[in-house]
Amino acid sequence: MNVESYVNALARNIDALRAQTPLVQCLTNQVVMNFTANVLYAVGASPAMCDNPEEAAGFATNVASGVLVNDGTPSSEQMEGMRLATEAAVAAGKPWVLDPVAAGGLRWRTAEVKKMMDANPATILRGNASEILGFLGGVAGRGVEALHSTSDAVDAARELARHYGCVVAVSGAVDMITDGDEVIQLANGSPLLTQVTGVGCALGAVMAAYASLTNPLDAAIAATSHLNIAAENAAAVAKGPGSFAVELLDALAALTGAQAAERVKLA
Amino acid sequence: MNVESYVNALARNIDALRAQTPLVQCLTNQVVMNFTANVLYAVGASPAMCDNPEEAAGFATNVASGVLVNDGTPSSEQMEGMRLATEAAVAAGKPWVLDPVAAGGLRWRTAEVKKMMDANPATILRGNASEILGFLGGVAGRGVEALHSTSDAVDAARELARHYGCVVAVSGAVDMITDGDEVIQLANGSPLLTQVTGVGCALGAVMAAYASLTNPLDAAIAATSHLNIAAENAAAVAKGPGSFAVELLDALAALTGAQAAERVKLA
Amino acid sequence: MNVESYVNALARNIDALRAQTPLVQCLTNQVVMNFTANVLYAVGASPAMCDNPEEAAGFATNVASGVLVNDGTPSSEQMEGMRLATEAAVAAGKPWVLDPVAAGGLRWRTAEVKKMMDANPATILRGNASEILGFLGGVAGRGVEALHSTSDAVDAARELARHYGCVVAVSGAVDMITDGDEVIQLANGSPLLTQVTGVGCALGAVMAAYASLTNPLDAAIAATSHLNIAAENAAAVAKGPGSFAVELLDALAALTGAQAAERVKLA
């Protein structure tokens, strides 16, 4: 693995996103819609939460640069919007990111997003270790009970990446990103990231933004590093989870490609 | 045009809103519900997000001072609530504001809110230049492609204001407000307003608050100026989009009628 | 009443919540989902907004430590999810909290949550004085028009507590909590609490968190005091409603059991 080439791409992509301001269509959960939209603006992209069945496909085809599907608070109407948007995105050659919230633990939603993934594989699948293991459980008939170690998540991620021909990104204290072959580890971040709701959800949206301008592996690296390095800057001045969330948006908007390249812990 | 009388009305209305605390029924999008509610509190009004078909009409008739309809994330159920609330508002003589998000670009929602507007015209129609042009396209069968200059938006706004007998407010670097005859320009604001999601949406809600206590033209001026002058105060101390949103709420709550009158750039 | 034993329990419960991090299933309104989730994290609990009919009962049975039902923006689909979750919670012996937003004033939702309460009584019923009086109106066929004094709310709260065998918590400048027999008054807080949307809604979620680790009376006291004392700390440094909301999250995360016991005004 050529670390330097990944780091150079990171610097380039962070600056390119601000120049291009891609529009991310977010079919996401109600808890994080506002925060996700503000994170997209802060990194230099634009949000559009178009998720109804009447318009979701047309928007993916004609307007969106990339699509995020996050099933955190699904309604039957939104689920149908997701199905239509992902179908249209793939048909139009637009990237889409799946964030299968609570995969494995909640059966209805897991089955629904697995059907979408089987019919029109995502460009990037992202989740925490439990969700990636839970999603694989749906594939292979396994449960998640005994599978929670980091090395097991790496294997599951690689298996899913190969099965779907996508990149899989696993978030945690150390983030892991794989295309089924190469496995990248990213070690930036802050414990405060787990005390603010929706940071992982927003990460999926930022991946969809970066995936509209570069390959899925570099997109997942850029999104993860943009967020995690900004989080370190925010944590340095925050007094608690409330001020951290505010500082994070300021830090996302201030981070440059050069600073990210200097600070990223990539292996 | 008598600039001084508009400015005097502005000062009066900003102070009057805090004294009367009107209740705005918001049928709005999921992205901005929280921010809109907090903006309404900060300017001195109260929010109520009553948008289900079972209760929306009764609430508009019996409880609300004014109604906001914003179709940013419409579901079929909420769309029916909007139809019922606007019908009830007009029947009860309550003002209502239409914010036709993505009008022209997204056909289903544009057609639905146009039906509401045709059946029960809003007191104020507000949007950005593209939305106002897109909405007119729906009226006259035109598209929006070649219509994006400022002067074209003024003509479209005036045409819509005359057609519906309402005030049309177009937001942008310079805001324009017209009743079909007079055209008011307001030149306050900050570029940071475009980096926080939902400021335009919240502006619609604030217009509905002011429209419950004064005429539509003065209401649109008061809402726009209250928000834009507070934004200047917030931008002076903000470090980025996250802290700007927080400072904006503080500044909205602190602005007085006298300060607004002194600072407003009205022509 | 032994004030000292209540205060000792308060100190213990605040520290125990952080140690146990209970998971609260929130079936709540769209306006406050994000803020509620962040408040739960800040006090030391975890949120999960699982409210669809397909999964709500299973989640309450198998995963949640406690359940919150808040009918602030009900859809027909979410209302069915609420019915199923409360039934499952009671069957599984999990505590649930009802926050009947706008009870009495809005008939559809009041009737719906009253049916849930009659079928599977909540552990804690919480609201402002008007909502508690409105909910009782539904029980006894009375309106709320002439019933808004504090002493009348105490009587209504006691009557409801006895009728349902639950604890009733009435929020206001002075908060009152009763199990139908004992009446506790808590006098902490800040006027800024009424200028930020969703603080009362978040309080319900925090009550569900505390109710998963102690009795309903001590749970309501701990939740109310945790929030109100943190609000005093936040108000001491806030410049307005925007910064107050941010400081409140920081202060919730920083409050210790010992500090709460020293500061609580309980009678």
Image (cartoon, coloured by chain):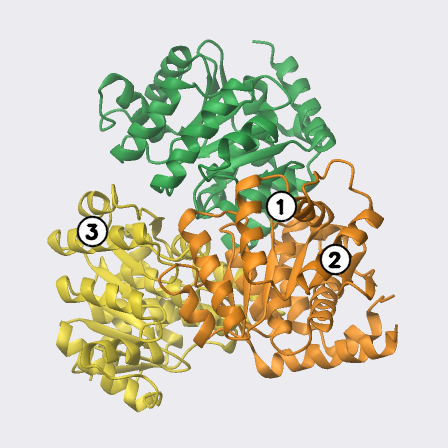
Chain colours: A green, B orange, C yellow
Q: Is residue B257 above or below residue C24?
A: below
Instruction: Give the residue furthest to the left.
Output: C91
Q: Is residue A188 above or below residue B87?
A: above
Query: Which picture quadrant has residue A163?
Result: top left
Discs 2 and 1 carry the same chain letter: yes
Q: Chain of mark 2?
A: B
User: Mark 3 is on which residue type?
Assistant: Leu
Task: Give me the C-alpha separation between circle 3 and circle 1.
Answer: 38 Å
Discs 2 and 3 carry the same chain letter: no
As helix, strand or loop, the secondary structure at mark 3 comes to: helix
User: Mark 1 is on which residue type?
Assistant: Ala
Q: Is residue A149 visible?
A: no
Q: What residue did someone put label 3 on?
A: C84
- Disc 1 crowd, CA 10 A, few/some/many (<14, 14-19, 20+): many
Discs 3 and 1 carry the same chain letter: no
Residue C147's disc number:
none
